[in-house]
């Protein structure tokens, strides 16, 4: 089962937004959250190395920059999450629907996910 992703909150932190995310799985398998990255030009972060094990859920913070006019983004940003389990390392590409508020606050809906086996 692919872990579910949700944006828990966002608050201003300098020129970025400190977003808090939750990755949740109910299959009981132990995994390691290896890294996270939002590479989209108008919804982006630096790559974040995490390296923390989890079984049911894990939360992480990511500094996101949204240098765009208020309203919906006209392209589809995504969040790349790399997870390792007993079988392999996996790249999870979560497609996001993002709308930016008047103050720059990102409002995110997580859409479909594509899973790629890395090793």
Image (cartoon, rainbow, N blue to C red):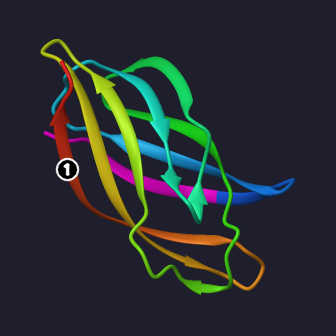
Quarter holding residue 1: top left
Q: Residue 62 in the image: x percent, y percent?
A: 61, 43
Inspect the magenta stretch and tell me whether residue 3 lies in it. Answer: yes
Task: Give the x, y percent position of residue 101.
Answer: 67, 82
The secondary structure type at the circle numbered 1 is: strand
Count of all numbered marks drawn on residues in the image: 1
Q: Nearer the viewer, residue 95 or 33?
A: 95
Residues packed near mark 1 inside 10 Å, few (<14), some (14 to 19) or many (20 plus): few
Q: Is residue 9 left or right of residue 3?
A: right
Q: Is residue 81 left or right of residue 98?
A: left
Placement of 75 over or under 93, stated as above or below: below
The location of residue 83, given as percent across then percent down, is: 31, 27
Q: Which residue is mark 1?
A: 114
Q: Residue furthest front?
A: 41
Say left or right for 77 vs 114.
right
**Residue at (45, 82) in percent of width and height:** 74
Q: Quadrant of the C terminus?
A: top left
Residue at the right extreme of this rendering: 14
Return the x and y of residue 96 as percentages of the image width and height: 39, 65
Q: Quadrant of residue 32?
A: top left
At 61% from the left and 47% from the top, the residue drawn is 45
- Residue 118 in the image: above or below residue 81: above
In the rendered view, would you say 21 is above or below 77?
above
Q: Is residue 14 above or below residue 85?
A: below
Residue at 55%, 37% in the rendered image:
60
Q: Is residue 108 magenta?
A: no
* Residue 77 figure quarter: bottom left
Write down the region rendered in magenta. Answer: 1-9
Q: Main secondary structure of the magenta part?
A: strand
């Amino acid at each position: 089962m692919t872990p579910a992703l949700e944006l828990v909150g966002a608050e201003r932190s300098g020129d970025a937004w400190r977003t808090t995310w939750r990755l949740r799985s109910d299959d009981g398998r132990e995994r390691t959250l290896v890294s996270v990255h939002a590479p989209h030009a108008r919804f982006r972060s630096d790559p974040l190395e995490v390296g923390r094990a989890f079984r049911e859920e894990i939360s992480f913070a990511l500094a996101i920059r949204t240098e765009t006019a208020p309203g919906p983004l006209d392209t589809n940003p995504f969040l790349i999450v790399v997870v390792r389990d007993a079988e392999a390392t996996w790249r999870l590409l979560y497609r996001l629907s993002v709308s930016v508020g008047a103050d720059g606050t990102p409002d995110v809906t997580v859409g479909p996910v594509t899973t790629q086996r890395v090793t």
